[in-house]
Image (cartoon, coloured by chain):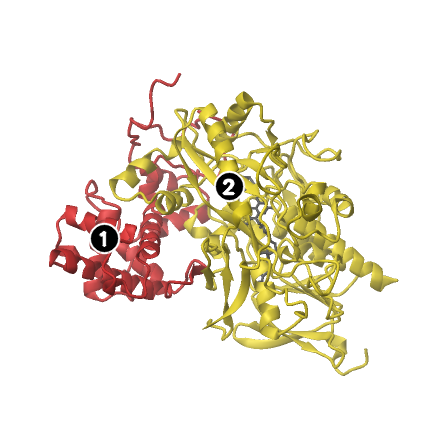
């Protein structure tokens, strides 16, 4: 390291500060490395900036336009794409079940999909660590999956939707439990941040938690990273990379307020999420010898079922995903691979009204009348497997955005497996809601989370990165975000993204520290 | 227990609950700021010409009728402001042009459909005929040449969602449905079925 300017080179640049980037940043900084995070979004102050208002939350969404094609075009923005220091965790609802061991080898079990090069055994210690560090509130013992340590914090209180799902499931013999949520049921001190109060049941996790009770990255890993000396640069949109003759990355190029800047570095962790990560690689023609960059786009099957109840539900209160059942993780006698979990859902009025408009096509007086019953509405949804398919991918379109970069286009069409799973799930959910006493029941089709697009695997022919998240082609490029998942898993992704990211950082440190 | 079917019983809540709450310490300053800003009238300019705006206003009147309000929420103005801001929702259907262009062309196509079927502009139609035109667009059952390059069903869904969200984001619409989630300063201690804090409205 004698080249001119190398004094300015940091050990690693982390691109993106969401569920993947933030844990990496904290881990590397704690190990004494010099690290800089480049984040396209702005910095928020949890206590002051977050209004308890759905329309005001729009600042948290990634609003650069993406094109959506296919027979089930994916909705981005509010549905699944955050931005800001903290990434999509600023508005995730903090539902954090662990994946189960068989989630990692669907192909071995069913002959479809693509297996992970690592498994539950490698990730379990990280799940333990994360639940403790984030402050996950959950039930102990946990009814599903292999034996595990108890959650440090008891579960959060059940809201109306959770109680109704509990009632419906109980009469059908389906087991339920209060869900694991990354929100505090008791206050605590968080290193680098300070006091985090207990959740006040505002139900508004999707708008950014105004109190710090929710374990988004801005109140957990990012303050820890800063505490250990990491620098986080907000408002920096990465556009390219500089490389040396050997192909290694020597610097990251980014746009800050219309100016081009560069940060020299010895390694890059690309954590920009499952749309922007492949988009950046495709724009720069990098790391795509396998041809898999952008391929294998998956989105969780997420059909929702809404119903009206005689009781007052007031669905805006309490942690939104209060209850869980994993009894359908691998249901018997079905015609599809994999399975799903069941979740109760509270809902805010704008989200619900938008779904009534889109899903039921109600308008006029019928819409207003339906909405006047809002306080009696409760929902359940599933979160289920989605298989990779050659028809589902992210590509660059020929439309140029305001930065002069090609807009990404996603192609997504549900396949036979997703359709069968949805059919099964809707039948089960209808039984539960009928048993709970619902009327005016209706289903809303939804695909949640953007997954895949730079998958990990055992070989450079079929995958973009290895099990340690290292590019097969560029020695000092790692990818740590939702794009590395080779399969969707039948659970919400954030906890596993963080676990994979922490493990990748540890592997990176192990190799280089020695 | 379940004699009273809430479906048959149309719920009505007392007016004024949200406006009253916003001015108390039940609502945090950040939330109160957001809600107060939304009580101001929109500018309603920058995207449509006068003819287009007339059609949009007439469509909003049917998609979310407010005949019961002496001062209806200016939904067309809110939708136009949003389009004029250029801030989208982060995605669009590949088959649709950008949001503002889709809306201009869709509104013109609604008007052309009205002319083709009734010999009058959309805004000149009586309520029943307007509803028939909108329902045809929603079904995709429309004259091909007026809708060349624009999928009527997708367009209708986007228009309806935009108008619906403009309406239910408004504090006055939120009190219509008995929502008090903006009272965020204290949070909620009871969240189960039937639980009600003293400041939460009850149906009339
Ligand atoms: C409304 C909602 C609810 C959710 N609820 C849950 C839940 O309950 N449980 C769960 O497990 N998951 C949930 N998720 C999903 C979860 O938040 C995401 O899966 C997770 O945050 C993805 O992590 P990531 O690191 O891949 O990307 P992100 O967290 O999205 O982070 C990517 C970051 O990279 C930045 N970035 C992108 N491009 C660039 C660039 N070129 N230069 C610089 N920075 C860039 C972005 O601004 C962003 O901050 C939810 C998501 C949403 C939107
Ligand atoms: S429900 Fe709890 S965790 Fe979620 S935003 Fe409200 S206080 Fe924060």
Q: Secondary structure at mark 1?
A: helix
Q: Nearer the viewer, residue A231 or A11?
A: A11
The answer to whether residue A244 of the structure is visible from this angle is yes
Measuring 58% from the left and 26% from the top, which residue is drawn there? Answer: A174
In the displayed structure image, the side of residue B28 where residue B10 appears, left or right: left
The circle drawn on residue A422 is 2
Please, what secondary structure does the residue beneath circle 2 have? helix
Report the chain holding disc 2: A
> Residue A507, how many percent across, how many down?
80, 57
Nearest the viewer among A86 and B183 is A86
Query: Do discs 1 and 2 share a chain?
Result: no
**Compared to A461, does A386 lie above or below?**
above
Give me the residue at 20% from left, 40% from top.
B68
User: Is A378 in front, or is A305?
Assistant: A305
Q: Position of residue A508 (x, y in %)?
A: 79, 60
For label 1, being within 8 Å of ligand 1 is answered no
Crowd rating for badge 1 (residues with CA inside 10 Å; few <14, some 14–19, many 20+): many
Q: Is residue A133 left or right of residue B79?
A: right
Residue at x-position 23% and y-position 53%: B59
Chain letter for mark 1: B
The quarter of the image holding the N terminus of chain A is: bottom right
Which mark lies nearer to you, 1 or 2? Answer: 2
Please identify the residue farthest to the right as the structure is shown. A514
Picture quarter with ligand 1: bottom right
Residue corresponding to mark 1: B59
What colour is chain A?
yellow
Disc 2 crowd, CA 10 A, few/some/many (<14, 14-19, 20+): many
Quarter of the image where the C terminus of chain A is located? bottom right
Chain B display color:
red
């Amino acid at each position: 390291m004698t080249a001119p300017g190398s004094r300015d080179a940091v050990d690693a640049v982390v691109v993106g500060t969401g569920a993947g980037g933030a844990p990496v940043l904290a881990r590397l900084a704690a190990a004494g490395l010099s690290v800089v995070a480049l984040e396209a979004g702005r910095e928020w102050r949890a206590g002051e900036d977050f209004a308890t208002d759905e329309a005001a939350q729009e600042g948290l969404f990634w609003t650069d336009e993406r094109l959506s094609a296919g027979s089930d075009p994916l909705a981005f923005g509010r549905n699944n794409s955050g931005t800001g220091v903290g990434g999509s965790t600023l508005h995730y609802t903090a539902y954090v079940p662990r994946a189960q061991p068989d989630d990692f080898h669907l192909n071995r079990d069913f002959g479809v999909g693509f297996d992970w090069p690592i498994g539950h055994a490698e990730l379990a210690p990280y799940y333990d660590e994360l639940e403790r560090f984030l402050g996950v509130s959950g039930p102990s013992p946990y009814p599903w999956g292999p034996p595990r340590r108890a959650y440090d914090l008891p579960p959060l209180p059940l809201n109306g939707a959770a109680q109704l799902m509990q009632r419906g499931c109980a009469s059908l013999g389906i087991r339920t439990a209060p869900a694991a949520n990354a929100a505090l049921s008791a206050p605590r001190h968080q290193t680098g941040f300070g006091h985090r109060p207990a959740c006040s049941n505002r139900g508004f996790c999707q708008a950014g938690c105004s109190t710090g009770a929710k374990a988004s990255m801005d109140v957990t890993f990012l303050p820890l990273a800063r505490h250990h000396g990491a620098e986080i640069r907000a408002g920096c949109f990465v556009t390219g990379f500089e490389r040396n003759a050997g192909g290694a990355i020597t610097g990251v190029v980014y746009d800050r307020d219309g100016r081009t800047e560069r940060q020299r570095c010895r390694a890059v962790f690309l954590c920009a999420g499952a749309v922007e990560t492949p988009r950046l690689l495709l724009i720069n023609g990098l790391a795509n010898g396998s041809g898999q960059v952008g391929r294998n786009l998956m989105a969780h099957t997420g059909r929702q079922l809404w119903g009206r109840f005689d009781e007052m539900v007031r669905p805006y209160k309490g942690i939104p995903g209060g209850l869980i059942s994993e009894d359908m993780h691998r249901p018997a006698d079905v015609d599809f691979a994999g399975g799903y979990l069941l979740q109760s859902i509270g809902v805010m009025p704008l989200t619900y009204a938008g779904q009534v408009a889109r899903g039921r096509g109600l308008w006029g007086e019928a819409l207003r009348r339906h909405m006047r019953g809002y306080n009696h509405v409760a929902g359940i949804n599933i979160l289920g497997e989605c298989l990779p398919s050659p028809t589902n991918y992210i590509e660059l379109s020929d439309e140029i955005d305001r930065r002069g970069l090609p807009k990404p286009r996603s192609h997504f069409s549900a396949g036979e497996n997703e359709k069968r799973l949805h059919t099964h799930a809707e039948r089960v959910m209808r039984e539960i809601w009928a048993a709970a006493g619902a009327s005016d029941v209706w289903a809303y089709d939804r695909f949640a989370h953007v997954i895949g697009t730079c998958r990990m695997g055992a070989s450079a022919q079929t995958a973009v990165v290895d099990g340690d998240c290292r590019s097969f082609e560029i020695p000092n490029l790692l990818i740590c975000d939702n794009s590395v998942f080779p399969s969707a898993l039948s659970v919400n992704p954030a906890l596993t993204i963080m676990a994979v990211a922490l493990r990748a950082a540890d592997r990176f440190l192990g190799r280089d520290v020695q | 227990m379940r004699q009273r079917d809430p479906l048959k019983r149309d719920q009505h809540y007392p007016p004024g609950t949200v406006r009253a709450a916003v001015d108390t310490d039940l609502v945090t300053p950040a939330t109160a700021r957001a809600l107060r800003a939304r009580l101001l009238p929109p500018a309603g300019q920058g995207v449509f010409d006068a003819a287009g705006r007339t059609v949009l206003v007439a469509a909003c009147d049917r998609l979310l009728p407010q005949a019961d309000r002496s001062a209806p929420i200016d939904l067309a103005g809110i939708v136009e402001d949003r389009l004029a801001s250029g801030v989208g929702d982060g995605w669009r259907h590949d088959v649709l042009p950008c949001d503002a262009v889709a809306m201009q062309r869709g509104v013109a196509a609604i008007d052309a459909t009205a002319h083709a079927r009734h010999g009058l502009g959309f805004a000149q139609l009586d309520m029943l005929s307007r509803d028939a035109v909108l329902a045809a667009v929603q079904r995709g059952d429309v004259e091909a040449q007026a809708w060349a390059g624009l999928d009527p069903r997708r367009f209708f869904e986007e228009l309806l969602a935009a108008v619906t969200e403009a309406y239910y984001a408004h504090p006055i619409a939120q009190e219509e449905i008995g929502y008090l989630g903006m009272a965020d300063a204290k949070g909620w201690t009871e969240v189960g079925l039937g639980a009600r804090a003293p400041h939460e409205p009850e149906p009339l």
